[in-house]
Image: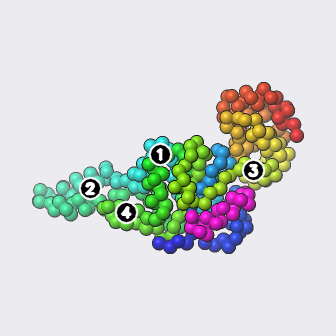
Amino acid sequence: MTDASATPGFGSPEALGKALAETGYLADEGLVTAGWLATRLGRPLFLEGDPGVGKTAFAEALAAATGANFVRLQCYEGLDAAQALYDWDFPRQILHLRTVEAAAGGERLDADAVEASLYDRRFLIARPLLQALEQSPSVLLVDEIDRADDEFEAFLLEVLSDAAITIPEVGRIVADVRPMTVLTSNRTREVHDALKRRCLYHWVEHPEFDREVEILRTRLPEVTQRLAEEVAHAAGRMRELDLIKPPGVAESLDWAGALVTLGARALDPERAAATLGAVLKYREDAEKVHAGGLAALLRR
């Protein structure tokens, strides 16, 4: 295995930023620099921030910009090694065993040979972590690591450190090129220091007004400049209201897309009220916004 990164062609953060922009992802200077350093140093990148700020999209854009394979591991409570790494295709193994027995026609079988054939590589199901090791170069996204259990975090440390796994029946599998790994967290719980120490860390902020407008116009070319500015302004105001779930860029894009679908070229209180479900996901948040007055929220 080589320590070369999945993105060897970018000589500077600016070059990586330009490549990401060509995919439609407009990252700020801090995120681009963190991503570039992670690729150059061969270190995982740990991205933390509010939901919807573009953490997952960064990994997708990195894969698109580099031409690397994109592999996503979605974390959840109860995730274990078998679901993340590999498993054996039990039904196919049973079918194979019956085929061998039928072909033998009652003759005595070599038990060791039959057992070995059952654990042939063709019966191995590669889960995301094994896929990332075998499909070099690759960008591995470990999404929402804060939803996984402590035990899975500990297991992940070993895989990330060695970029290799040992399967008892097959042997050791080592990545030809160490995957560029991006871990994300919405901070629903604190991730252990042992994992963070092995990563470069970056907190992903909500975008500033001008960059959010640019993101809306880039991702949704049919959105007018005025509508993009008004959506970005209103979303920014909502983030100041201490909501249960402040809107991220993903919600701004959904909102702008809904408004465009309705034929809007500007944002008014009536259209805002009709489409508020695209940007706010809790009844309490919608009530708070309505209580403050949509007209006042939209006023620039």
| Label 4 crowd bin: few (<14), some (14–19), many (20+), radius 10 Å | few
Q: Please, what secondary structure does the residue beneath circle 2 have?
A: helix
Instruction: State the image coordinates of residue 152 (x, y, percent, origin top left).
Output: 45, 50
Question: Relative to 234, is 174 above or below?
Answer: below
Instruction: State the image coordinates of residue 157 (x, y, percent, origin top left).
Output: 47, 57
Identify residue type, mark 3.
Pro
Can residue 70 be seen by looking at this rendering? Answer: no
| Label 3 crowd bin: few (<14), some (14–19), many (20+), radius 10 Å | some
Classify residue 240 as left or right of residue 281: right
- Rounded to the nearest angstrom, the CA distance separating label 4 from label 3 is 42 Å
Of all residues shown, which one is farthest toward the right?
Answer: 300
Q: Nearer the viewer, mark 1 or mark 3?
A: 1
Can residue 203 be seen by looking at this rendering? Answer: yes
Looking at the image, is mark 2 or mark 4 earlier in the sequence?
2
* Residue 38 position by quadrant: bottom right
Identify residue type, mark 2.
His
Disc number for residue 96: 2
Q: Which residue is mark 1?
A: 149
Q: Which residue is mark 3?
A: 207
- Rounded to the nearest angstrom, the CA distance separating label 2 from label 3 is 55 Å
**Residue 157 part of the magenta segment:** no
Q: Residue at 67% across / 37% down in the picture? A: 245
